Amino acid sequence: MKYAQIRKYDTANGVGIRATLFVSGCTLNCKGCFNTQYKDFEHGEQWTKEIEDNFINHINTQNVQGVSILGGEPMDQDETLVHLLRRIKEETNKNIWIYTGYKFENLIVNFKSFNVLKYCDILVDGPFIEKEKDLRLAFKGSRNQRIINVSKSLAQHQIILFDIEERGLCINA
């Protein structure tokens, strides 16, 4: 797996102060994507054990409340991502947000993507649609995208949206 960027302290891609990893590689080709250079699977740096260990150590600090994984496309990655997510849960117990252009309904029936989802707390799903773009939205780029509470959705066998307003955030949805 290659990655394009790590933001050690990010507040734009989930609730709280987060460590954000942008993976490289995406097959979706959404029109108007803001990370076009991250579509290339060869863009960026090779993910190594040393980088992963440093990332985990950083996440374990009290200043970091969670982790966000964006891209590129997280669901287009190899088993390296699943290994990282497992380590995050086992070694830090921090919450994980994943952004994907795929729909939740399609991810839960695919073995590979379900292995990613089972470590995910919040999923922002759906392709970016340029005509649905709204800069007033919190944590998503277009109105068609959903912010899903994954554990509740899997337990209740239906999509349960994450309630941003209950977290004390003021947004226009």
Image (spheres, grey):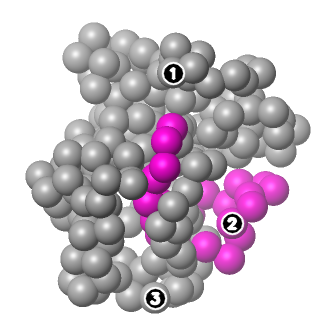
Q: CA distance from mark 1 to mark 3?
A: 35 Å
Under circle 2, the secondary element is loop
* Tag 1 secondary structure: helix
Tell me the crowding category of disc 1: few under 14, some 14 to 19, or many 20 or more residues within 10 angstroms, Cα based: few
Q: Is residue 79 left or right of residue 39?
A: left
> Would you place residue 32 above or below residue 58 in this image?
above
Residue that mark 1 sits on: 167
- Is 84 in front, or is 159? 84
Task: Evaluate whether residue 52 shows in this view.
Answer: no
In x, y percent, where is residue 36?
A: 71, 70
User: 26 or 67, which lies in front?
Assistant: 67
| Mark 3 surroundings: few (<14), some (14-19) or many (≥20) residues within 10 A | some
Q: Is residue 26 magenta?
A: yes
Residue to which mark 2 is pinned? 35
Residue contact at pointers 3 and 2, CB within 8 angstroms:
no
Could you tell me if residue 11 is visible in this image?
Answer: yes
Q: Provide the residue span drawn in magenta.
A: 15-38
Q: Nearer the viewer, mark 1 or mark 3?
A: 1
Look at label 3 and name its amino acid: Glu
Mark 3 or mark 2: name the one nearer the start of the chain.
2
As measured in the structure, the alpha-carbon distance from the residue carrying label 3 to the one carrying label 2 is 16 Å
Q: Is residue 51 left or right of residue 106?
A: left
Which residue matches tag 3?
45
Query: Residue at point 38% right, 66% down?
Result: 77
Rate crowding at label 2 as few (under 14), some (14 to 19) or many (20 or more) other CA atoms within 10 Å.
Answer: some
Q: Tell me the residue at 32%/42% (across/down).
A: 95
Locate residue 148, reporting x and y percent.
46, 27
Magenta-colored stretch includes residue 162: no
The reply to whether dot 1 and dot 3 touch (C-beta < 8 Å) is: no
- Of pointers 1 and 2, the one earlier in the residue sequence: 2
